[in-house]
Image: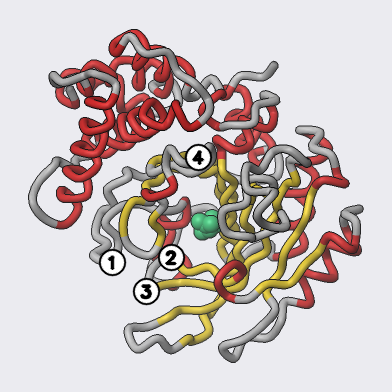
Amino acid sequence: MKNSKQIRQEFITFFEDRGHRFVRSAPVVPNDDPTLLFSNSGMAQFKDVFLGTGVREYNRAANSQKCIRASGKHNDLEDVGHDNYHHTFFEMLGNWSFGDYFKKEAIGWAWELLTDVWGLPKDKLWATVYEGGEGVEADEDAENLWRSITDINPQQVLRFDKTDNFWEMGEVGPCGPCSELHIDLGEGTCPLSEEHNCSVNLEGCWRFVELWNLVFIQYFRDQTGELTELPNKHVDTGAGFERVVAYLQGKDSNYDTDLFTPILDEISSLSGVAYQSDEQGMAHRVIADHARMLTFSISDGAIPSNDGRGYVLRRILRRAARYGRNLGMNDAFLYKLVPIVVAVMGEAYPELNERVAYIQ
Ligand code: SER
């Protein structure tokens, strides 16, 4: 079985072989962007390039970005622990084109990596495209490309509205129609299958899980909500690393991968309560997730406080502590999880290694 480090590296190498520059993750605390409390996507560090106010010495990039979605437009906090595939802190694997390649390459390479390199079953993959609206046409180009340059089942290319297929970084900023790849994990994988008809983009469905989002950045949304066309067209993709790892490691849950099991084991050993992957394991999952979020955000310069970014940390810290009490941990314990988070993540994010004592 491949470990998570190998999988992360395979993604980077695949895109390096196709002319992309590996770029280190930006901090989770964004520099100079008052519209974002935390980096919520890989593209955040390239926003200036999309807007045409900045340039890089390369026009293709790839990385794994440290992301936090615990506030603002993209907020997954309430799902954490209840399901097995949302996190406040997660890694996003991304490849970018800055005014260089566009939909054809983005779609072709995503398909090639998932199906040829990683061997995902083609008949279980579903693609989605933008159905149009807000003065933007339906994305027939992407729809036709899926059907012509890949061997996806043509019936498994669906159209959705802007909730799912128009991506925006925040209320203001670069944006565009997107095309997503979802995997069908099969019957028996969704606890709600008796209550709903499992399908792509159905809120709360565990059977169809989004793996990768390919955004075709073409617009800027301003303060008044108006869209204007950008001078160049760009590609911004993001694949959910923990979900890819779970699939490739044959696990139903992100928490059963090597990204989380050492942290869950440590929580079990500190609390004396064994982890269970059903509802009983909610406290372990929340604590593991929040320990990662706090470790990374404090390492990158955030600090718990009474407002703004610091207040998000404070709420998460208190929430983790509360779930700790459910496991009988009444004294301070979160700091004891920092070394194990760093042991799991420190090779990919070496900046953590020097800050263990500070974070604790
Ligand atoms: N920006 C897009 C997302 O976060 C793709 O990277 O989903």
Please give the name of the residue rendered at 38% of the width and 25% of the height, measured from the top-left corner.
Answer: 284
As helix, strand or loop, the secondary structure at mark 4 comes to: strand
The quadrant of the rendering that contains the C terminus is: top left
Q: Give the residue pinned by disc 3.
A: 171
What residue would you read off at disc 4?
A: 64
C-beta proximity under 8 Å, tags 2 and 3 = no
Answer with mark 2 or mark 4, whichever residue precedes in sequence: 4
Point out the frontmost of discs 2 and 4.
2
Q: Amino acid at mark 4?
A: Ser
User: What secondary structure is found at the residue carrying circle 1?
Assistant: loop
**Ligand 1 contact, mark 2 (Cβ < 8 Å):** yes
Q: CA distance from mark 2 to mark 4?
A: 17 Å
Q: Position of residue 267 (x, y in %)?
A: 34, 17
The vertical placement of 346 against 132, above or below, is above
Circles 2 and 1: CB atoms closer than 8 Å = yes
* Badge 3 amino acid: Glu
Secondary structure of the residue carrying numbered label 2: loop
Residue placed under numbered mark 2 in the picture: 169
